[in-house]
Image (spheres, rainbow, N blue to C red):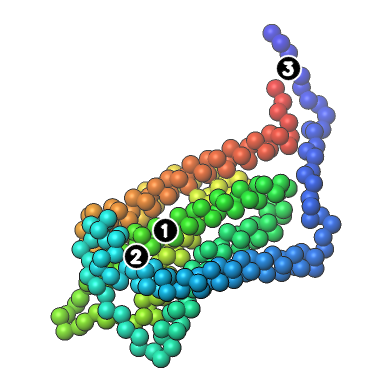
């Protein structure tokens, strides 16, 4: 039987990774953050300029698209839609809505650049990494953000908009909506979904740094499923099909977060084994 060697001395010391920010002072970090923010905002400004050239299309077919009963998503989802009556009750209402549409669309288009600049500033503080990893993490973040934007616009907005537009407490009350209120609600729903869909991203990085585990997420899986159905019941008409169409993607998103958390824990364990060595 082979004897195993017993380590009697001090454990091997892990070589600290090269810190490309180690020689930077506090003011240097602030200066880098300032330029990162400026570059990220520059990407958003480029997105707004692009949106300006397609302003009429974005307003008529993207921003106002869900207000029309012939919106193609209604046919796909089988929603019995009606036309919404939109009014401008404030003097600069249409002006603010027009530029708000350009700014929101430009922010979405320029978001990858903003994400990259912010992550390039944050990531060296957590680990030493190659530049290609920063690109990979940016793609990871941007993908789920845009996926959430798409879910919000093509799934959540049609159900929520038609539900609230057809909800009446009395026939004496007509549902005529202000353009600013409509634009604010549309933006809130879409951007909120983009943020909610960052759950797998958050799960991965928290697990990678030992702050979250798949077991913890599994422990609260039932609570998450119930929360998804409650949210879908609030945002959809009172029929099971609509509620399931909203709840199922949210539940799958949570399950994906559990799987991604497992990858983050595995990545953390490999990093620790590489740092301290694998005896035996």
Mark linked to residue 157: 2
Of labels 1 and 3, earlier in sequence is: 3
Q: Residue at x 41, y 70 (%)?
A: 57
Counting from the top left corner in percent of width and height, residue 106 is at 52, 68
Can you tell which quarter of the image residue 228 is in? bottom left
Q: Position of residue 75 (x, y in %)?
A: 25, 58
Q: Which residue is drawn at the image coordinates 57% and 51% (left, top)?
A: 139
Q: Nearer the viewer, residue 28 or 212?
A: 28
Q: Residue furthest front?
A: 53
Q: Would you call the spot at circle 1 few (<14 residues within 10 Å), some (14-19), or many (20 or more)?
A: some
**Direction from residue 36 to residue 16 in the image, left or right:** right
Q: Is residue 231 above or below residue 34?
A: above
* As drawn, 8 above or below 92: above
Mark 2 and mark 3 residues within 8 Å of each other at the beta carbon = no
- Mark 3 lies on a secondary structure that is loop
Quarter of the image for the C terminus: give it.
Answer: top right
Name the residue nearer the viewer: 258 or 114: 114
Residue 179's x, y, as percent? 36, 80
The residue tagged 3 is: 4
Few, some or many residues within 10 Å of mark 3 (<14, 14–19, 20+): few
State the residue lying farthest toward the bottom: 91
- Work out whether mark 2 precedes mark 1 in sequence or the reverse, and give the earlier one: 1
Residue drawn at (37%, 51%) of the image? 249
**Element marked by disc 2:** helix
């Amino acid at each position: 039987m082979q004897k195993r060697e017993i380590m009697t001395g001090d454990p091997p010391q892990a070589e600290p990774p090269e810190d490309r920010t180690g020689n930077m002072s506090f003011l240097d970090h602030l200066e880098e953050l300032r330029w990162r923010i400026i570059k990220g905002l520059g990407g958003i400004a480029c997105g707004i300029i692009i949106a300006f050239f397609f302003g009429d299309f974005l307003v008529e077919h993207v921003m106002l698209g869900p207000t029309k009963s012939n919106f193609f998503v209604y046919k796909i989802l089988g929603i019995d839609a009606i036309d919404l009556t939109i009014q401008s009750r404030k003097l600069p209402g249409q002006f603010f809505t027009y530029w708000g549409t350009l700014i929101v669309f430009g922010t979405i288009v320029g978001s990858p650049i903003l994400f990259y600049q912010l992550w390039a500033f944050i990531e060296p503080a957590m680990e030493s990494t190659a530049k290609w990893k920063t690109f990979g993490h940016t793609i990871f973040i941007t993908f789920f953000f845009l996926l959430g934007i798409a879910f919000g616009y093509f799934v959540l907005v049609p159900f929520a908009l038609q539900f609230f537009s057809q909800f009446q407490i009395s026939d004496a009350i007509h549902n005529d909506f202000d353009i600013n209120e409509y634009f604010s609600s549309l933006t809130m729903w879409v951007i909120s979904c983009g943020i909610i869909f960052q759950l797998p991203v958050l799960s991965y990085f928290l697990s990678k740094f030992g702050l979250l585990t798949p077991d913890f997420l599994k422990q609260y899986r039932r609570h998450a499923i119930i929360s998804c159905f409650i949210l879908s019941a609030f945002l959809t008409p009172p029929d099971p099909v609509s509620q399931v169409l909203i709840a199922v993607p949210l539940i799958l998103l949570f399950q994906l977060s559990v799987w991604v958390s497992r990858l983050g824990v595995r990545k953390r364990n490999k990093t620790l084994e590489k740092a301290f060595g694998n005896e035996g």
